[in-house]
């Protein structure tokens, strides 16, 4: 049985923090990671640190820039009228780069990327022996065939308007079967077993001492970035390292404006601050009880919070979620749930009566000890006591420990940042399908729908039910800010994963 906790994760900013140096005409962007990645097999790794490297050393058929899907190696893509057949022509002259031993370098350095390499990559994903974590994203592929050196045809079992977005994933990066067969099962596990086709190549990797170098393969860099350097740094030291000019930038959660000299910023909504319930427990399976408690938390509406000082957010979807390359928050604006116009005391009494009780069972609420919202959470708890006559034990824990408790089902209620397992709407909706038949039906219909507008209509219906039944209470948004030196330009970041794309970065 799926449980609510399956989507309660905070964004993995600890995986990637980011420094710069420029000497002798070599421009370097220094990225800090908590731990040096060790597996760079695009069809297997789902480590965000490794994916950041792969994003810069590979070019795929398509890629995302500022949330938009654009062609990369794909020169042309024709989609059949029924949406099931993709005929793709790739650019000629895209070459592989190899850093390893001379014997293989003589064979593979400068070898041209062919359509069959993309076909082999997709077939690797679908091969059960690969155990690819991306299988579920590509299981709809019926066949992938190279029809020439520079053309391939991908047929789907059913139309999928999100398919080009899936082709942006590292899993769809090219893999030469000829090179793969020389790796003896170690493809992507070392510099010697990597063959890349992007504007950078992994030149040096030292997992033991925590550093790596990625160098440009462009003959004439001009003002383009020449080198990316990875260094191992503890997650809590990023701001200090940035101020010491040891790293080129860093991510941080923030709802307050902080300024640094010679610095630019990018910001986006990375997670929802929400009240969540363990709906596997009888008390919180009751809709009226959830609504009564949610009345004080929804969008900070009745929490007594100064709404000018908080980032109000009333969608169950964080701002990073996309649908076919468009942010869902631009496509769907939730309406205020009807229970907000009902007296919360009446809802609480009705819910208790349905359970044959006059008071709630003893419950505890988990509160983050490392959140700037803690005072607001405490205020909401006091309002529950004062206005509803319900008293809860408070447990203060770091968010990481709250997630562990939720994963074990050892909680009643919790305030915490909520982010889904993936950057699709289903990463949220799937968590509620067990608890509501209509949500399950609309979600299944959306997944099966080949028309984007119709799928969006089903998504809205499912989301509205979750909202109306107070299955989760969205309150505010947690803003992630990326600070970086202002002499870097054209940096692209995937808001959901915080992956940094430096392939187009210039230094001026």
Image (tube, grey):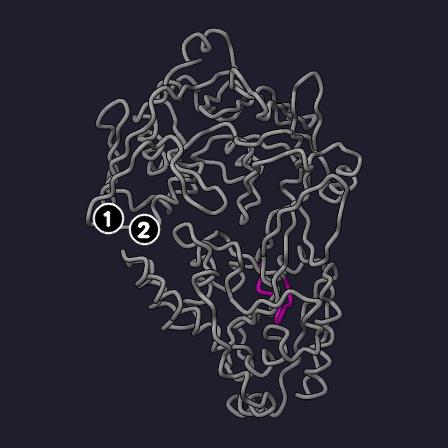
Mark 2 and mark 1 in contact? Answer it, CB < 8 Å. yes
Q: In the image, 157: left or right of 444?
A: left
Q: Quadrant of the N terminus?
A: bottom left
Q: Quadrant of the C terminus?
A: top right
Up/down of 458 relative to 214, above or below: below
Q: Is residue 437 above or below residue 138?
A: below
Please, is residue 493 above or below residue 120 in the view?
A: below
Seen as rendered, the residue at the extreme front is 508
Residue linked to disc 2 = 161
Q: Which mark is residue 83?
A: 1
Q: Position of residue 230 (x, y in %)?
A: 65, 29
Q: Which residues are magenta?
A: 407-416
* Towards the viewer: 137 or 279: 137
Residue under the image location 53 percent in, 49 percent down: 496
**Is residue 410 found inside the magenta-colored segment of the image?**
yes
Q: Nearer the viewer, residue 349 or 419?
A: 419
Q: How many marks?
A: 2
**Residue 70 shown in magenta:** no
Within 10 Å of disc 1 (Cα), the crowding (few <14, some 14-19, many 20+) is some
Q: Residue at x 61, y 62 (%)?
A: 477
Q: Nearer the viewer, residue 74 or 411?
A: 74
Q: Could you tell me residue 431's position as x and y percent?
A: 46, 63
Q: Residues within 10 Å of mark 2 (few under 14, many from 20)?
A: some
Q: In percent of the image, x 73 and y 76: which residue is there?
A: 379
Disc on res. 29:
none
Distance from the alpha carbon under mark 2 to that under mark 1: 8 Å
Element assignment for label 2: loop
């Amino acid at each position: 049985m799926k449980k609510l906790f399956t989507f309660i994760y905070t964004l993995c900013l600890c995986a990637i923090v980011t420094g710069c140096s420029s000497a002798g005409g070599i421009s370097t962007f220094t990225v800090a990671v908590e731990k040096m990645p060790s597996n760079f097999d695009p069809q297997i790794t789902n480590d965000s640190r490794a994916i950041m490297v792969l994003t810069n050393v590979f070019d795929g058929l398509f890629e995302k820039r500022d949330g938009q899907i654009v062609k990369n190696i794909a020169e042309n893509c024709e989609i059949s009228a029924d949406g099931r057949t993709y005929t793709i022509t790739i650019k000629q002259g895209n070459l592989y780069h190899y850093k390893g031993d001379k014997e293989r370098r003589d064979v593979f350095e400068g070898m041209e990327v062919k359509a069959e390499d993309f076909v082999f990559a997709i077939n690797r994903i679908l091969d059960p022996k690969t155990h690819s974590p991306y299988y579920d994203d590509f299981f709809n592929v019926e066949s992938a065939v190279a029809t020439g050196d520079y053309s391939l045809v991908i047929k789907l079992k059913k139309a999928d308007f999100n398919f080009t977005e899936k082709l942006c994933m590292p899993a769809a990066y090219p893999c030469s079967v000829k090179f793969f067969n020389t790796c003896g099962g170690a493809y992507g596990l070392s510099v010697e077993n990597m063959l890349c086709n992007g504007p950078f190549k992994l030149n040096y990797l030292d997992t033991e001492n925590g550093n790596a170098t990625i160098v440009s393969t462009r003959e004439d860099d001009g003002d383009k970035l020449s080198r990316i350097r990875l260094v191992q740094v503890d997650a809590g030291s990023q701001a200090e390292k940035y101020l010491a000019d040891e790293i080129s930038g860093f991510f941080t959660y923030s709802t307050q404006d902080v300024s640094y000299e010679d610095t630019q910023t990018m910001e986006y909504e990375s997670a929802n601050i929400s009240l969540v319930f363990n709906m596997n427990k009888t008390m919180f399976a009751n809709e009226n009880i959830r609504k009564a408690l949610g009345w004080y938390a929804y969008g900070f509406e009745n929490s007594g919070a100064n709404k000018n000082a908080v980032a109000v957010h009333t969608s169950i979807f964080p701002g990073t979620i996309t649908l076919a390359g468009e942010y869902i928050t631009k496509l769907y604006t939730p309406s205020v749930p009807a229970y907000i116009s009902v007296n919360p005391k009446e809802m609480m009494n009705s819910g208790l009566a349905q359970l044959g009780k006059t008071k709630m069972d003893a419950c505890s609420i988990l509160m983050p000890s490392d959140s700037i919202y803690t005072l607001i959470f405490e205020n909401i708890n006091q309002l529950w006591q004062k206005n509803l006559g319900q008293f809860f034990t408070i447990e203060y824990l770091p968010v990481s420990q709250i997630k562990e408790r939720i994963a074990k089902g050892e909680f009643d209620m919790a305030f915490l940042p909520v982010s889904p397992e993936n950057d699709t709407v289903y990463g949220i909706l799937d968590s509620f399908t067990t608890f509501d038949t209509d949500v399950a039906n609309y979600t299944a219909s959306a997944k099966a729908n080949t028309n984007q507008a119709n799928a969006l209509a089903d998504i809205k219906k499912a989301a509205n039910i979750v909202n109306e039944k107070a299955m989760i209470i969205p309150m505010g948004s947690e803003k992630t800010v990326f600070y970086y030196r202002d002499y870097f330009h054209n940096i692209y970041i995937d808001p959901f994963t915080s992956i940094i794309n430096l392939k187009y970065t210039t230094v001026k």
